[in-house]
Image (cartoon, helix red, strand yellow):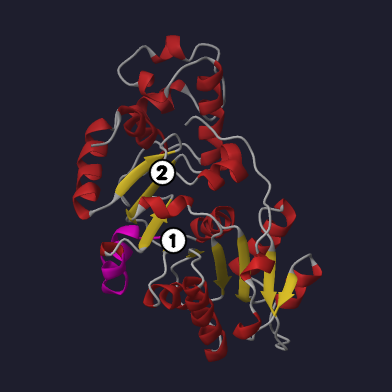
Amino acid sequence: MISKLTQSILMLTVHFSTNEIGTSPLTITEWAKLADFLKVNKLSPEQLINQDIESLLSGFSDPKITLARLKKLLQRGTLMALTSEKWLRSGIWILNRSDKEYPIKLKQRLGINSPPILFGFGNKKLLNQKKIVGCVGSRKVSKNDLLFSEGLGKLAADEGHSIISGAAKGVDESFMLGSLKAEGTVIGVVSDNLLSKGLSKIYRQYIENNDLVLISSVYPEASFNVGNAMQRNKYIYCISDAAVIAYSGKTGGTITGALENLKKEWVPTWVVKNNDTTSGNQEIVNKGGEWISSDLTQIDFKKIFSQAKRQDSLEF
């Protein structure tokens, strides 16, 4: 059962179909503006359903977030109910930012820019583990990079650390499966088609064993989108406590995400040492990352974890 609060935020911020035509749901930035107004005026989003929205939002003004747009979004109640019922039957759960299982580090580090809704499959308790190590990297990498990623996942599991990655082919998948096969606990942040990934053979057994949780901030049946993939990388860093870059190209999502993390100072960034002149690893170090050995026997998790900056949590 979805709470009234979650229902209202779903209608305001989420697509319910790949073919949905009409008013666009609020972006994270737009939702932040509306949520801030509601908080200041001691209102809650569910009050906007079937109430006098003109009166409730008196004093709120934004050229893009018009009352007409909000009304159209809130008229999608039937579509929301039918679609969310299908997702729930498939095993998907839905969190809003005020739910206790929502990743606290995500709210603390991103503040108003944290996603208002998270969809997921699996064990929600894994989202707020301590000392979570992230590992990211390109899809197309060498066999040695894949072996390192898989070995790092196993090592983390052996030492009792949860891990987080992006559930994409290449480094992400190798890292996650390395941990899962060693009976570790894993968070996978998905940028597209959560529904399909949650039901896939590769992950299903680990979800059923409560060793894996897959999460997404976008419509669970969404196709691949570069913007969503970039956001996914941001969430990996913000839920982790330290991140390892196994291999990065000189362009693309991996290096962009790593440089954003360094700029925002979310978590320490460790970069695997290599001699590949086509790699972007050296540039990440030049911008503030620190080298880490490609020899797994030299990996020391006590060294790579450090205190991260925190921010106040949000109500919704």
Q: Secondary structure at mark 1?
A: strand
Asked which quadrant contains residue 283, the reply is bottom right
Going by the image, does 255 lie left or right of 219? right
Q: Quadrant of the N terminus?
A: top left
Other-residue count near label 2 (Cα within 10 Å), few / some / many at <14 / 14–19 / ≥20: some
Which span is picked out in magenta?
191-206
* Residue at the disc numbered 2: 101
Tell me, yes or no, if residue 154 can be seen here. Answer: yes
Other-residue count near label 1 (Cα within 10 Å), few / some / many at <14 / 14–19 / ≥20: many
The verdict on residue 256 being magenta is no
Rendering coords of residue 122 (x, y %): 32, 57
Q: Is residue 68 above or below residue 162?
A: above
The amino acid marked with disc number 1 is Ile
Going by the image, does 183 lie left or right of 314? left
Rendering coords of residue 61 (x, y %): 56, 19
Q: Secondary structure at mark 2?
A: loop
> Which residue is pictured at 52% across the width and 90% down the height?
143
> Which residue is pictured at 27% across the width and 36% down the height?
2
Q: Is residue 81 above or below residue 133?
A: above
> Which residue is pictured at 51% across the width and 84% down the height?
146
* Residue at the disc numbered 1: 187
The amino acid marked with disc number 2 is Glu
Residue 306, disc: none
- Mark 1 to mark 2: distance in Å? 13 Å
Residue, far right: 286
Rendering coords of residue 251 (x, y %): 66, 72
Q: Foreground: 176 or 253?
A: 176
Asked which quadrant contains residue 289, the reply is bottom right
Rendering coords of residue 93 (x, y %): 30, 47
